[in-house]
Image: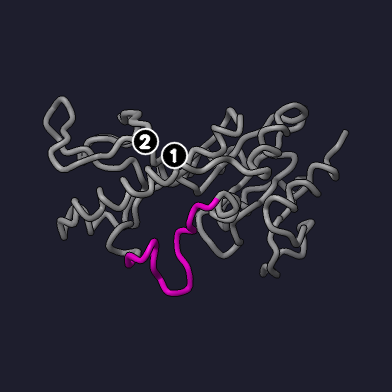
């Protein structure tokens, strides 16, 4: 069974109504990105309540969203391929669509951990809020299980290894100018088939099969191309 690796980003969840991380004005849900997505904002400037409120809102919003056709087609590919997903998204729509092997590069909204705890020592919280004063058993304030600016990306090596083994690489919902996905592409072996689903022209995509569609339509076209 061929190994198929999917690199997914905000564009695949946008069609489910989830706001993209950053638009042209540098804001995320009307907040400056640096205030709600940087480690310094939490650990240096003490904006803990602001950040907790921000992610609580996003978690509550996620509960109302559903996987779209693109997520579902990715899950269906497991019938014919050994599928690994490396996603920049912090939502759980891939899981809810039925995918089983997912690497979350930027963490997960539905998990929390102590503010000074190892990345892999997390707690599943579902869609519950995290409030100031919510403490781990050893007395640490809980924080969102999100990889913020200024923090390492612990799962990056795992994703790079998956890409290096891929017979087929599918890039959907993320442009090739956004890292870490842009860097991960370089791990693909020369023989790998690379499909890029993006409605826009993308630099350095001449070696790829470029499906110029949004995620839902593009994944339908890809499914047809990959039919046994």
Mark 2 burial class by Cα count in 10 Å: few <14, some 14-19, many 20+: some
Task: Please give the residue where the numbered disc 1 appears in the rendered image.
Answer: 63
Q: Is residue 164 left or right of residue 86?
A: right
Residue 14 locus on image (x, y percent): 56, 54
Q: Is residue 107 left or right of residue 164?
A: left
* Quadrant, the N terminus: top right
Residue 179's place in the image compared with 26, above or below, is: above
The reply to whether dot 2 and dot 1 touch (C-beta < 8 Å) is yes
Q: Residue at x 15, y 56 (%)?
A: 46
Picture quadrant of residue 202: bottom right
Does the magenta segment cover residue 27?
yes
Q: Which residues are magenta?
A: 17-32
Nearest to N terminus: mark 2 or mark 1: 1
Residue 106 locus on image (x, y percent): 43, 46
Helix, strand or loop at mark 2: loop
Q: Is residue 221 left or right of residue 148?
A: right
Q: CA distance from mark 2 to mark 1?
A: 7 Å
Does the magenta segment cover residue 224?
no
> Is the stretch drawn in magenta largely helix, strand or loop?
loop
Residue 224's place in the image compared with 121, above or below, is: below
Residue 157 locus on image (x, y percent): 49, 41
Task: Please give the residue where the numbered disc 2 appears in the rendered image.
Answer: 127
Picture quadrant of residue 87: top right
In this view, the residue in front, 188 or 209, is: 209
């Amino acid at each position: 069974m061929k190994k198929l690796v999917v690199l997914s980003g905000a564009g695949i969840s946008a069609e489910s109504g989830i706001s993209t991380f950053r638009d042209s004005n540098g804001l995320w849900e009307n907040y400056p990105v640096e205030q709600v997505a940087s480690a310094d904002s939490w650990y240096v400037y003490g904006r803990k309540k602001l950040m907790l409120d921000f992610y609580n809102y996003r978690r509550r919003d996620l509960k109302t969203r559903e996987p779209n056709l693109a997520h579902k087609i990715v899950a269906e590919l497991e019938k014919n391929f050994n599928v690994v997903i490396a996603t920049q998204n912090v939502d759980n729509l891939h899981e809810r669509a039925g995918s089983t092997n997912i690497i979350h590069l930027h963490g997960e909204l539905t998990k929390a951990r102590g503010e000074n705890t190892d990345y892999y020592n997390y707690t599943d919280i579902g869609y519950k809020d995290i409030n100031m004063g919510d403490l781990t058993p050893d007395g640490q304030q809980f924080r969102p299980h999100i990889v913020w600016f200024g923090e390492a990306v612990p799962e990056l090596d795992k994703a790079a290894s998956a890409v290096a083994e891929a017979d087929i690489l599918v890039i959907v919902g993320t442009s090739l100018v956004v890292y870490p996905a842009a860097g991960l592409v370089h791990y693909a072996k020369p023989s790998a088939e690379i499909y890029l689903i993006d409605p826009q022209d993308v630099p350095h995509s001449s070696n790829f099969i470029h499906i110029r569609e949004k995620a839902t339509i593009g994944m339908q076209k890809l499914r047809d191309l990959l039919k046994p």
